[in-house]
Image (cartoon, rainbow, N blue to C red):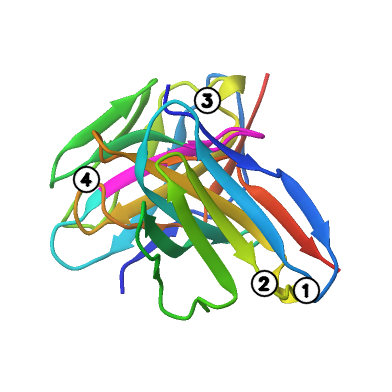
Amino acid sequence: GDSVTQMEGPVTLSEEAFLTINCTYTATGYPSLFWYVQYPGEGLQLLLKATKADDKGSNKGFEATYRKETTSFHLEKGSVQVSDSAVYFCATSRRSYGKLTFGQGTILTVHP
Amino acid sequence: GAVVSQHPSWVICKSGTSVKIECRSLDFQATTMFWYRQFPKQSLMLMATSNEGSKATYEQGVEKDKFLINHASLTLSTLTVTSAHPEDSSFYICSARPREDYEQYFGPGTRLTVT
């Protein structure tokens, strides 16, 4: 079946540092790829998505590019803020908005 | 918009009892709701998909008689854990998908502890 592997956390950074959270997937065909974020005490929110190879999803300064050749969808942000502290989940779906398969989540803590 | 709530946010129950968790879409109608389970430091695992007015579709390995799901209306789905045991202790998360959209909107989760 489909699977998603995320970089193990927790990740601790200083404010304005560069962030990368690695994500690789295993899926047949051409899945859609997602990053979700969960802030403390809140539900998961869709951060960004990409539905085909070479697509770049972006939102709130975060970016991720759908790389089919490396089956990856790494999350990046050039300058993190304290307010970015949250748990980040990479996910895949066989078709847009279908059943989601999640990675294990990566805890990010940003210090002032 | 697109807010999903869950109640309760946490619950402690004794082994052998049943507990009901509610998932509500507050500002939209949800034709489909999903129930996930999350173990500590592990990913969310889809338990079942429910469509309003029809029976839930359970994922392989999920006991349908133990985890009863009722999608009674376009804004409410309930998960009942029957005859709960300590191994059922977990974090349960629901999501809802509006009729006019395909994105899933997630609730904040319910922490269940069975003693």
In the image, taking residue A85 as reference, residue A32 lies left or right, namely left
Front: mark 1 or 3: 1
The picture places residue B39, in percent across and down from the top left corner, at 63, 63
Identify the element where label 3 is drawn.
Answer: loop
Query: Which residue matches tag 2?
Result: B82
Q: Quadrant of residue B31?
A: top left
Query: Is residue A1 toward the left or the right of residue B79 in the image?
Result: left
Circles 2 and 1 on the same subunit: yes
- Give the Cα distance between marks 3 and 4: 23 Å
Residue B67 in view here:
yes
Answer whether residue B83 is magenta in the image.
Answer: no
Q: Amino acid at mark 4?
A: Tyr
Dot 3 amino acid type:
Ala
Q: Earlier in the sequence, mark 3 or mark 4?
A: 3
The span picked out in magenta is A33-44
Q: Quadrant of the C terminus of chain B?
A: bottom right
* Residue at (31, 68) in percent of width and height: A2
